[in-house]
Amino acid sequence: MADAWDIKSLKTKRNTLREKLEKRKKERIEILSDIQEDQANPKKELVEADLKVQKEVLQALSSSSLALPIVSTQVVEKIAGSSLEMVNFILGKLAHQGAIVIRNVTIGMETGCEIISVQPKELKEILDDTIDACQQKEEEAKRKMADVSEGDDQGQPQEKNPKLDSGSARKESTSMDAPDDIMMLLSMPSTREKQSKQVGEEILELLTKPTAKERSVAEKFKSHGGAQVMEFCSHGTKVECLKAQQATAEMAAKKKQEGRDEKEVVDAVVSSTKTKTTETTTEDGEIITETVNLCDSESLESTEGSDSSHSETPDKCTKLHFKKIIQTHTDESLGDCSFLNTCFHMATCKYVHYEVDTLPHINTNKPTDVKTKLSLKRSIDPSCTLYPPQWIQCDLRFLDMTVLGKFAVVMADPPWDIHMELPYGTMSDDEMRALGVPALQDDGLIFLWVTGRAMELGRDCLKLWGYERVDELIWVKTNQLQRIIRTGRTGHWLNHGKEHCLVGMKGNPTNLNRGLDCDVIVAEVRATSHKPDEIYGIIERLSPGTRKIELFGRPHNIQPNWITLGNQLDGIRLVDPELITQFQKRYPDGNCMSPAAANAAAISGIQK
């Protein structure tokens, strides 16, 4: 019974393949008839795919220096002897084969296409096939020329045999191509598959397109007035930069000299063959005189003229450079210090250290940008009053945080006990869990810096304080020369070159600008436990114009519209009248550095 079913399924499959083959033959006949009808149409000749042009298009698309997206007119400019319609036809065929992704665009008064992405693997396969086809075409042309020359030598009657041979060969090739046609038909995508793919691309484009609200928020925080920072030179010092420029200039001069030598050789060949003419006798006895074309020499002259127009002196580098700090005890043969400007023993370290070279003149008297002021005014919450930097020197283990009020953003860089020798005091895990952080927020965000074993402890603290971890920032550390740190001072198994900042959310905070910044900060390492200043800009753009507080801060952490708490700050500075009143009620003497002072303040508060 099973054999009967197998035979039946094989017959059904064979009939299906026969039907597809017949349909394919009909389509070929229709295409051939259309070609015969449209032979007089000049547009068809323009659209006809030339193998050489297709080869150059594939080579251009496979280039590693190709910058996407690119329009078809730019491809036409790169390929000599091509037209816009021919390039559009080739790009459409490649898109149909799945090698590239394109979309139709209007370029001036003409219709073209824009290349969005490419598939290198498919392009390489098609390029290899095209190169093979070009070689076969050249061999076939040579073979035909040889056959024609043999026919002229042997006479007219012997021309019938090649025709018979070509006919039999055509029949053999047709019989051999039949299975390939069937497999090609089976591998071609159906109309339904094409439609579903097009719908998927349209949905993806809609999802990636920013909304009107996102564009409005991005415009508010857009930098006006151009870049305000300077880029470091990749060569490091001015000496290395000059060496690199000289090497580049020498390479350019070498190429220029090679071009001159090549031009001299061409000129010598041209001068020897300039007066020579070749005479060929045709069948009618006419004499054709061929002269030498001098376009190559003219193109070489124009190229050299354009090269000579450029200045031979290299352009002066306008980027920032470093210079070596060479002291009496420095040994340059040892190389650079691993810690550079963060070295604790720079006064006695024998390795090479660096400092920023003399800064160029920077004009700081830039005109104020009215747009920036307007955008900042629009982005600030009108219900919140902004104050200059405020801070309180205190021991956070004993501070009553209920007197501070509520905040939209809390940031903390706790002294975690990561079981390593550190240049500052640490807090135990239980002391971290017992902090009064829950009293600071009802609805808002917390940014908690963690490292090492504190990554798991920080997550536990967030859950205990009533937060849900919603995101995470990563600080990739670089050294003074803007290279990634490879000798970090923390880490039990591997040297840590990064730190994490957990982002937790409590309640339902409003007026948050999502999607403005990236979750990776690449910044230079400075003093011990000195976090990058970029974090303040990220937080301000995320929650502009709201009350913010930082725990375990130091003097370098004070910021406008922030209240900073820490035991290394200089006294107490408060500006908010309401906060001053609450703090004086709770701590009349202003001492919040010891548990005894905290208990005395609590007792006096109860008596009142």
Image (cartoon, rainbow, N blue to C red):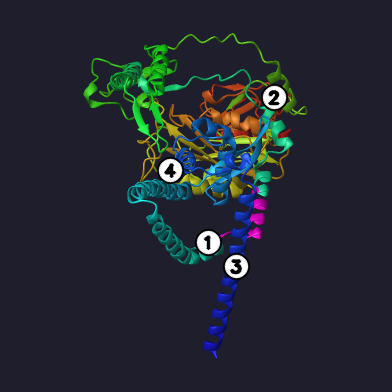
Can residue 98 be seen here?
Answer: yes
Residue type of the residue flagged with mark 4:
Ile
Give the dominant element type of the magenta stretch: helix, strand or loop. helix
The x and y percentages for residue 551 are 57, 33
Q: Residues within 10 Å of mark 3 (few under 14, many from 20)?
A: few
Residue found at x 65% / y 40%: 104
Circle 4 residue: 418
Residue at position x 56%, y 63% in the image: 185
Q: Which residue is mark 3?
A: 22
Place of residue 250 in the rendered image (x, y in percent of width and height, measured from the top left)? 30, 18
Q: Position of residue 173 (x, y in %)?
A: 45, 62
Nearest-to-viewer mark from 4 and 2 = 4
Type of amino acid under label 1 = Met
Tag in front: 3 or 1: 3
Q: CA distance from mark 4 to mark 2?
A: 36 Å
> In this rendering, would 600 be left or right of 317?
right
> What is the distance, in whole Å, between disc 2 and disc 3 at their CAs?
92 Å
Quick one: label 1, few (<14), some, or many (20+) residues within 10 Å?
A: few
Tell us which disc is closer to us: 2 or 3. Answer: 3
Residue 242 lies within the magenta run = no
* Residue matched to label 2: 580
**Most foreground residue, 371 or 407:** 371
